[in-house]
């Protein structure tokens, strides 16, 4: 089992910049309008409306100026300056400032979910690297202040997030033994734990001479393992011959590194 376990989407977290540049925590403060009546959560994307920060869907259907990383304002109750993980809708503060990571070249880490409106963790296939993915539509938590933003597993080639790479630290691997199938539509394996969930996007690798070789085949329909001796998986076409003599390894990748596509960031919109 990987550590830490990714149990739910958590928003978009800056990790570095493209080209290997370091993200040094540089941010820009932008004003939030007095009484702005929409929650904004840590890790959500925002835009500007009449010069003030406004929430936008994490799908980026509207261009963004960057990701929200908290805010400051004077409490209308205590009259004390607060630093908040999220912006509480309707707060009557005239000095509110959002902290925004606004560099268009920022690389974000994000969780992969099964569908736009769910928090169920899925897997990103190696086939998605270099492709685009769509953001999800889930709302963050007022209890934690964190976003529920992420990217949708079944959205390859669509959306405003370019996948730069997979996150190996939280990958989950399961060993299996080949039973039958060519890997073109159905692959039957044994050795999986009964009750285990194999999500869409789980990659099929072969262990050859101690090294993992991607077969080009990935799970296209989620499955819950019902038998340790004969579990059928629906998969995409394989680009390699799956050999019965080589152990199989199923690899789930719940997190990816993404960048906002050109034209989706307001600084790059003509």
Image: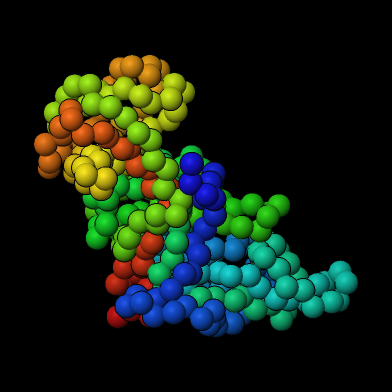
- Against 173, residue 29 (above or below) is below
Q: Position of residue 49 (x, y in %)?
A: 51, 74
Q: Residue at x 44, y 21 (%)?
A: 194
Residue 233 left/right relative to 152: left
Q: Residue at x 22, y 44 (%)?
A: 209
Q: Report which quarter residue 237 is drawn in.
A: top left
Task: Tell me how the rendering is colored.
Answer: rainbow
- Against 207, residue 142 (above or below) is below
Q: Position of residue 14 (x, y in %)?
A: 48, 69
Between 130 and 36, the residue placed more toward the observer is: 130
The single residue placed furthest to the front in the displayed view is: 209
Quarter of the rendering occupied by the C terminus: bottom left
Between 196 and 97, the residue placed more toward the observer is: 196
Q: Is residue 86 visible?
A: yes
Could you tell me how many numbered marks the image carries?
Answer: 0
Residue 68 left/right relative to 189: right
Q: Position of residue 228 (x, y in %)?
A: 38, 19
Between 131 and 244, the residue placed more toward the observer is: 244
Q: Report which quarter residue 75 is drawn in.
A: bottom right
Q: Is residue 214 visible?
A: no
Q: Residue at x 54, y 63 (%)?
A: 43
Q: Residue at x 33, y 16 (%)?
A: 229
Residue 100 left/right relative to 267: right
The single residue placed furthest to the right in the displayed view is: 78
């Amino acid at each position: 089992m990987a550590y830490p376990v990714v149990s739910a989407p958590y928003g978009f977290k800056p990790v570095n910049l493209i080209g290997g540049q370091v993200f040094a925590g540089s941010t820009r403060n932008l004003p939030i309008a007095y009484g702005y009546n929409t929650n904004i959560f840590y890790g959500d994307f925002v835009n500007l409306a009449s010069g003030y920060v406004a929430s936008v869907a994490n799908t980026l259907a509207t261009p963004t100026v960057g990701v929200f990383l908290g805010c400051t304002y004077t409490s209308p109750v205590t009259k004390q300056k607060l630093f908040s993980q999220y912006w509480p809708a309707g707060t009557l503060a005239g000095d509110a400032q959002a902290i925004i990571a606004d560099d268009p070249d920022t690389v974000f880490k994000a969780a992969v979910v099964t569908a736009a409106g769910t928090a169920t963790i899925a897997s990103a296939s190696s086939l998605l690297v270099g492709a685009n993915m769509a953001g999800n539509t889930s709302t963050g938590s007022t209890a934690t202040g964190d976003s529920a933003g992420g990217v949708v597993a079944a959205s390859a080639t669509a959306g405003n997030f370019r996948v730069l790479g997979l996150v190996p630290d939280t990958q989950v691997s399961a060993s299996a033994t080949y039973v039958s199938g060519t890997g073109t539509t159905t692959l039957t394996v044994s050795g999986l734990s009964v009750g285990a969930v194999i999500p869409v996007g789980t990659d099929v690798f072969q262990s050859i001479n101690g090294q993992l070789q991607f077969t080009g085949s990935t799970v296209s329909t989620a499955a819950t393992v019902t038998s340790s001796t004969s579990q059928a998986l629906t998969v995409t076409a394989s680009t390699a011959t799956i050999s019965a003599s080589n152990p199989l390894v199923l690899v789930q990748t719940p997190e990816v590194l993404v960048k906002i596509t050109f034209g989706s960031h307001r600084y790059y919109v003509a």
